[in-house]
Image: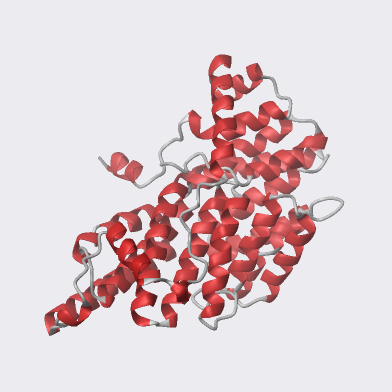
């Protein structure tokens, strides 16, 4: 029974279809279908089918985030808000008809306190999936809100869910929750003109962008980043390091390295979110691990290994941050011509195997990075960069 309970709190193995983009990319890089089948444990015919599906889906993905339709949150029309409320299932009862009794107020305070408690415990313990379960259990307590107090709590609840989903690698679920949070904060700002709603809206946009980036969709993520920039500045708040880091990743994914380097340098020089623990380490995580990989003429492997040691000391050996840094150090090693560095990379990936069951995106990276050695050295960097932003668990 204990084993079953533990399994429910871990990311279950990805279906082979989740690796279709990687399979298509390997074929494009010249790896024979028969060899790909051996690597993934599938027959050659199915490899061709998955590769074909991935090519078709790639063209559809570019327009998949068309739901962010507004150009200025401050200019939302009443008709837009009414339609958004209907879409979200919010009651149309006006707030002046709702009496905020002591009992209602106590209930709201309890909901907010409980939500914060779950989120803080989940983040500090890296128990992301249990946190998702506990947060979802609060949804019936919120119901279908119409007053701004409940709308505010609902918006934050969906933001927390989006954050835990994206850090678990469940990108599609994260995008859905982040989008709902964005819509709720739009409505909240329209109703209250509270600039804190704009600040929170910008945060939900960053979570949504992060989920797209984890799937290698840098161009798609730029839409969420643009809205995040707009509402953050409208709230009279400076852009933080997370924004610059994500913009750098989007540029990194679209092979605009010089522009990406500028963004990562800005991330290093910019204040992180005020709620972030270990601010100095957060700044290094948001910049150095990228700059070390795209350094010229060779990646800075020793610097990446040093960052891994720092992350392990700060966050713990089983933390998401340590797992990420181990994979980025392995990526740097695989982009060299040194066989000893290649062995180091494989050792780092192997040492991570027992830690990745809670982080679907990292589990995908662990599967794909070693395949760089199937390619000639001139194509390894291309594969490594691709692998770091693949997510076979995005639809879980």
* Residue visible at 19% across and 82% down in the picture: 96
Whether residue 277 is visible here, answered yes or no, is no
**Of the pair 155 and 83, the residue shown nearer to us:** 83
* Residue visible at 54% across and 68% down in the picture: 228
**Relative to 163, residue 46 above or below:** above
Q: Position of residue 37 (x, y in %)?
A: 59, 20
What quarter of the picture does the N terminus occupy? top left
* Residue visible at 76% across and 61% down in the picture: 259
Quadrant of residue 136 within the rendered picture: bottom left
Judge left or right: residue 11 versus residue 25: left
**Relative to 27, residue 68 above or below:** below
* Residue visible at 35% across and 41% down in the picture: 7
Q: Position of residue 30 (x, y in %)?
A: 74, 25
User: Seen from this angle, which residue lies furthest right?
Assistant: 297
Whether residue 90 is visible here, answered yes or no, is yes
**Of the pair 267 and 50, the residue shown nearer to us:** 50
Judge left or right: residue 136 versus residue 363: left
**Relative to 47, residue 380 above or below:** below
What quarter of the picture does the C terminus occupy? top left
Q: Position of residue 144 (x, y in %)?
A: 21, 64
Q: Position of residue 311 (x, y in %)?
A: 61, 62
Quadrant of residue 194 within the rendered picture: bottom left
């Amino acid at each position: 029974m204990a084993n079953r309970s533990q399994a429910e709190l871990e990311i279950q193995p990805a279906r082979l279809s989740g690796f279709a983009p990687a399979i298509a990319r390997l074929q494009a890089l010249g790896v024979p279908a028969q060899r790909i089948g051996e690597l993934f444990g599938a027959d050659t015919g199915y490899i061709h089918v998955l590769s074909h599906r991935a090519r078709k889906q790639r063209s559809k993905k570019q327009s998949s985030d068309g739901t962010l339709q507004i150009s200025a949150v401050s200019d939302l029309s009443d008709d837009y808000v009414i339609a958004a409320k209907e879409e979200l299932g919010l009651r149309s009862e006006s707030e002046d008809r709702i009496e905020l009794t002591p009992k209602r107020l106590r209930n709201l305070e309890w909901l907010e306190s409980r939500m914060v408690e779950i989120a803080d415990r989940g983040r500090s313990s890296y128990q992301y999936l249990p946190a998702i379960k506990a947060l979802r259990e609060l949804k019936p307590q919120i119901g279908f809100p119409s007053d701004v107090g409940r709308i505010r709590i609902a918006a934050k609840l969906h933001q927390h869910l989006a954050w835990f989903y994206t850090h678990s690698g469940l990108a599609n679920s994260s995008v859905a929750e982040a989008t709902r949070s964005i819509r709720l904060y739009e409505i909240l700002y329209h109703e209250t003109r509270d600039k804190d709603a704009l600040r929170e809206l910008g945060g939900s946009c960053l979570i949504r962008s992060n989920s797209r980036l984890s799937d290698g969709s840098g161009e798609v993520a730029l839409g969420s980043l643009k809205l995040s920039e707009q509402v953050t500045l409208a709230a009279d708040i400076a852009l933080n390091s997370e924004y610059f880091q994500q913009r750098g990743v989007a540029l990194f994914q679209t092979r605009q390295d010089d522009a990406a380097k500028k963004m990562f340098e800005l991330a290093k020089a910019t204040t992180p979110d005020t709620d972030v623990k270990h601010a100095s380490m957060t700044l290094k995580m948001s910049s150095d691990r990228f700059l070390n990989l795209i350094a010229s003429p060779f990646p800075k492997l020793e610097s990446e290994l040093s960052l891994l040691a720092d992350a392990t000391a700060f966050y713990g050996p089983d933390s998401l941050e340590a797992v990420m840094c181990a994979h980025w150090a392995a990526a740097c090693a695989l982009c060299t011509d040194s066989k000893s560095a290649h062995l180091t990379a494989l050792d780092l990936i192997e040492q991570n195997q027992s830690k990745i069951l809670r982080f679907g995106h990292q589990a995908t990276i662990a599967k794909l990075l070693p395949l760089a050695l199937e390619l000639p050295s001139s194509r390894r960097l291309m594969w490594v960069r691709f692998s770091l932003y693949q997510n076979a668990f995005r639809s879980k």
